Amino acid sequence: MADEQPLHKGFVLGSIAYSLGKKADDNKSHEWTVYVRAANPEEDPSLYIRKVTFHLHPTLQPPSRASETAPFEVTEQGWGEFEISVQIFFHDSKERPVEMMHQLRLYPPNDAPASQVAKPVVAERYDEFVFNTPSDALRTKLSADIVPGPKDNPKVWKYSPHAKWWTDYDAEYDARTDRLQEIYTQITAQLQEASKRRRILEEENEAIAKRQS
């Protein structure tokens, strides 16, 4: 049955780091934020995410930080890059937590152009949650249309101060889908035209064969 099909939700795990400038403390050269956000800029991920726990470097106290409401993020200051372990928990107890790793990036690549060096360093990846057997309550939330919330809603990343630096993967997905549909339409039209030409050639061959008989 259709309502028994797995449901998918696109999300982004990433970090954004800003240089604090030449006058910054040697041990705090950057301010950075690690986050889990919905792929759709209008979506409130707290509808299905209950909590996100970020396990940071042991020199940061406390090293484990739990974010229990959207935006699911942690902001810190430091100078070093390290790997962050992330655990994502859902409202539905039947859904097992998702565990992922994220490499914090503070510095742009060595070959980055000067214009990029002046910008914050963003490191993120797109992925999808797959809910194979969600409860009826969670399925209803996952299947509902996304309705934009109140203006400046902090639970959606559209209004985040970092938003202008982030990739709108939802828009990219729509663009790819539109492009695939356009290609499909073009191929279908070409196949129809080829089929029409074939029929014309077959009719011409039949007419020639009758004249020669």
Image (spheres, grey):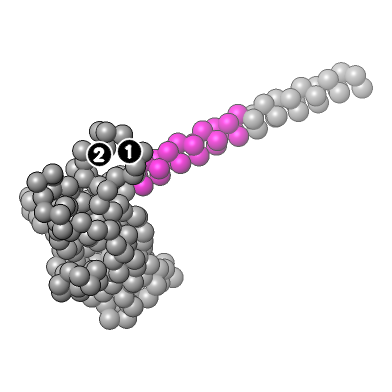
Residue 88 seen in render? no
Residue 136 position within the rendered picture, expressed as x and y whole percent measured from the top left:
29, 75
Q: CA distance from mark 1 to mark 2?
A: 7 Å
Q: Most extreme residue toward the left, as rendered?
A: 151
Using the image as rendered, state which of residue 2 and residue 62 is in the foreground. Answer: 62
The image's mark for residue 117 is 2
Residue 173 seen in render? yes
| Residue 107 inside the magenta-drawn segment | no
Q: Is residue 81 above or below residue 184?
A: below
Using the image as rendered, state which of residue 148 and residue 68 is in the foreground. Answer: 68
Q: Most extreme residue toward the bottom, as rendered?
A: 93
Q: Earlier in the sequence, mark 1 or mark 2?
A: 1
Q: Are marks 1 and 2 in contact (CB under 8 Å)?
A: yes
Q: Residue at x 31, y 48 (%)?
A: 169
Q: Is residue 189 above or below residue 109?
A: above
Residue 191 position within the rendered picture, expressed as x and y whole percent measured from the top left:
60, 34
Residue 115 position within the rendered picture, expressed as x and y whole percent measured from the top left:
25, 33
Using the image as rendered, state which of residue 150 and residue 195 is in the foreground. Answer: 150
Q: Which residues are magenta?
A: 173-193
- Residue 213 left/right relative to 104: right
SS at mark 1? Answer: loop
The image's mark for residue 199 is none
Q: Mark 1 is on which residue type?
A: Ala
Q: Most extreme residue toward the front, as rendered?
A: 26
Q: Residue at x 92, y 22 (%)?
A: 213
Q: Mark 2 is on which residue type?
A: Val
SS at mark 2? Answer: helix
- Residue 54 left/right relative to 181: left
The image's mark for residue 112 is 1
